[in-house]
Amino acid sequence: MNAKDSKRKSGTDCERLANMTDEEIDYSDIPPLDEEFFEKGKLRMPEKRLTTVPIDTDILEWFKSHERYEIIMNSALRMYMEAQCGKGQHPDVA
């Protein structure tokens, strides 16, 4: 995503979507999950490592003002990493 993309207005009717009931949602293109799916499925969680990173006070306080801020910070870092990977800058992770 670039600066031009972020200024573009979404064509999504967010108000209509927010007011839809579950019954009004069309799931016809999504196959039902059967027993086989759950038997073969595996939960994969990324490995976590506790670390110490110096962060500007104002940035940390802003994140801490949100519930579950550690998860939000991790997500923000992941989105940045994935954006860089898309530019051919794949991280070398040992």
Image (tube, rainbow, N blue to C red):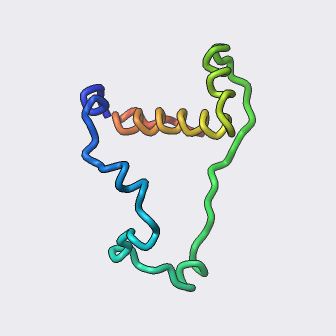
Image coordinates for residue 19, horizontal then vertical, percent: 42, 57
| 19 on left or right of 74 | left
Above or below, 25 relative to 81: below
Image coordinates for residue 48, horizontal then vertical, percent: 69, 44
Query: The C terminus lies in which quarter of the figure?
Result: top right
Above or below, 16 relative to 1: below
Which of the two residues, 40 or 93, is positioned nearer the viewer here?
40
Q: Looking at the image, which residue sits at the far bottom? A: 35
| 14 on left or right of 58 | left
Count of picture labels: 0
The quarter holding residue 9 reads: top left
Which of the two residues, 31 or 92, is positioned nearer the viewer here?
31
Residue at 33%, 74% in the rendered image: 29
Which of the two residues, 11 or 23, is positioned nearer the viewer here?
23
Residue at 41%, 33% in the rendered image: 84
Residue at 44%, 39% in the rendered image: 82
Residue at 51%, 36% in the rendered image: 92
Q: Looking at the image, which residue sits at the far top? A: 57
The quarter holding residue 67 reads: top right
Query: The N terminus lies in which quarter of the figure?
Result: top left
| 52 on left or right of 83 | right
Which of the two residues, 4 or 92, is positioned nearer the viewer here?
4
Image coordinates for residue 11, horizontal then vertical, percent: 25, 46
| 65 on left or right of 4 | right
Above or below, 7 relative to 31: above
The quarter holding residue 77 reads: top right
Image coordinates for residue 45, horizontal then vertical, percent: 64, 55
